Amino acid sequence: MTASYLTGVLRESCAVLEWNEHGDFERVKQLAGCSMKSALFFTLLETDFYPKAGETSLVLCKNRVYDNVIVDYGEWREEVLGEFFRCDRQFVVGSLSEWRLEALTEAAVRRRQGFHWETLTVFGSEEARKNLEKKQRSPVRRVPVSLDVFQITEQIIDFYQQLF
């Protein structure tokens, strides 16, 4: 959804790297009927998607001079924190559902240790969101729910105008 906003509304170039083992980008590529533009990426709706990304993909993106590079590190993992904190802006996106809250709570502990990022959530109760704000002592923004991550609504535009 962020890439759709950056390319579709702001008209900026964007790459999205899947720096995790989920395999979601491969499924998106198959469902959309896309083919790889190179050995490393495919393009969908003006955004270049890099499945199974890593340092090589990141260097390639920096050399291609994208306006924006979004990196999806997957779950909160200690081994990617170095790369995560090298980013110009950091966002931790998570769910406030009771069975998923542990990862955000662990991140909140890190935040109190002096690390900084913006926290965004999609699902969960308002009570859980407020409790997380207290634990990490910073705002937790709620991302608008969208049935189609490629469709940009007025509500989504308003959200991203505040974020960027």
Image (spheres, rainbow, N blue to C red):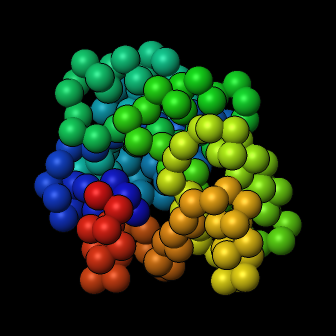
Residue drawn at (60%, 38%) of the image: 115
Q: Is residue 86 left or right of residue 27?
A: left
Q: Quadrant of the N terminus?
A: bottom left
Please state which of residues 44 and 92 is positioned toward the viewer in this rendering. 92
Could you tell me residue 92's position as x and y percent? 58, 51
At 79% from the left and 63% from the top, the residue drawn is 101
As displayed, is residue 64 above or below residue 126? above
In terms of depth relative to the viewer, which is nearer, 59 or 159?
Answer: 159
Q: Is residue 134 left or right of residue 139?
A: right
Residue 59 position, x and y percent, is 37, 17
- The outermost residue toward the left is 11
x then y, percent, for residue 54: 52, 23
Quadrant of the rendered structure where residue 110 is?
top right
Residue 94 to residue 52: above or below: below
Q: Is residue 73 left or right of residue 144?
A: right
Q: Is residue 157 left or right of residue 90?
A: left
Would residue 4 be visible to someone looking at this image? no
Closest to the observer, 151 or 164: 164
Nearer to us in this view, 163 or 60: 163
In this view of the protein, can residue 110 be seen by the observer?
Answer: yes
Decide: is 56 above or below 41. above
At x 33%, y 19%, the residue is 60
Total marks drawn? Answer: 0
- Determine the residue positioned at 29% across, 58% down: 164
Residue 49 lies, in percent from the top left, at 40, 41
